[in-house]
Image (tube, rainbow, N blue to C red):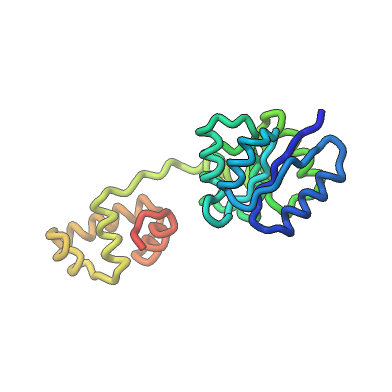
Amino acid sequence: MTITLLIADDHPIVRDGLRGIFTGERGFEVLGEAAHGAEAVTLAEALKPDVVLMDLRMPGTDGVAAITELARLGNPARVLVLTTYDTDSDVLPAIEAGATGYLLKDSPREELFRAVRAAARGEAVLSPAVASRILGQMRAPAQEPLSQREIEVLNLVARGSTNKEAAKKLFISEATVKTHLLHAYAKLGVKDRAAAVAVAFERGLLGS
């Protein structure tokens, strides 16, 4: 059975390379190419490919937004993310949006073929690095969320306020500020103000 493909990537050289790889392999047919997420959705609706090879970081509509829209439309195509990024902020949103698999662009050609065939069968496909990252997330203890007040205190600390200044701005005592900070340290798994601010920013808890 021939597996039909749609390639979505904003780099023409990457699209050309992928088309060449799959055109030269029996059992695959490339139906079209998209330069951004919105075009990928339009072509997936028109061409009905078995698998969409989806880059994540594209101008305008990115890969995650495109995956989300395809799921909303009930498009039957399986989406295999093919990207250079394997950070939590890239992997988890893509999987949660409905991607069938997640592969890195430095994967060997045979691994790419196997991944596309597996995705076409509806099987989950993850590169080893991504699989390890997700397993690590699952095995990690659940993170207790920061309270709104703890976030407010950390926001002030991030802007350079001392405990005394933060207390004055929030109309609470300095001792209460210290208590909020200690609770935040424990929840974030850190031991000082600088580390707390850094981790909170990394998790998107603080305003820019």
Q: In the picture, residue 17 is in which quadrant?
A: bottom right
Location of residue 126 in the rendering, given as x and y in whole percent from the top left corner: 66, 41
Residue at position x 13%, y 58% from top?
172
Quadrant where the image shows the C terminus: bottom left
Visible in this render: residue 37?
yes
Tell me the quarter of the picture where residue 121 sits.
top right
**Quarter containing the N terminus:** top right
Residue shown at 50% from the left, 43% from the top? 140
The x, y position of residue 59, in whole percent, is: 55, 57
- Foreground residue among 153 and 185: 153
Residue at x 70% of width, y 42% of height: 6
Q: Could you say where residue 115 lies in the image, as x and y percent from the top left?
A: 73, 39
Nearer the observer, 15 or 175: 15
206 vs 143: above or below: below
Q: Is residue 52 left or right of residue 57?
A: right
**Residue sitting at x 78%, y 48%:** 19
* In this rendering, position of residue 96 left or right of residue 162: right
126 vs 198, left or right, is right
Q: Is residue 128 visible?
A: no
- Number of numbered labels in the structure image: 0
Expressed as whole percent of the image width and height from the top left, the position of residue 195 reads 40, 63
Relative to 184, is 13 on the left or the right? Answer: right
Vertical position of residue 162 compared to residue 41: above or below: below
**Front residue (pair 153, 190):** 153
Position of residue 201 relative to residue 76, above or below, is below
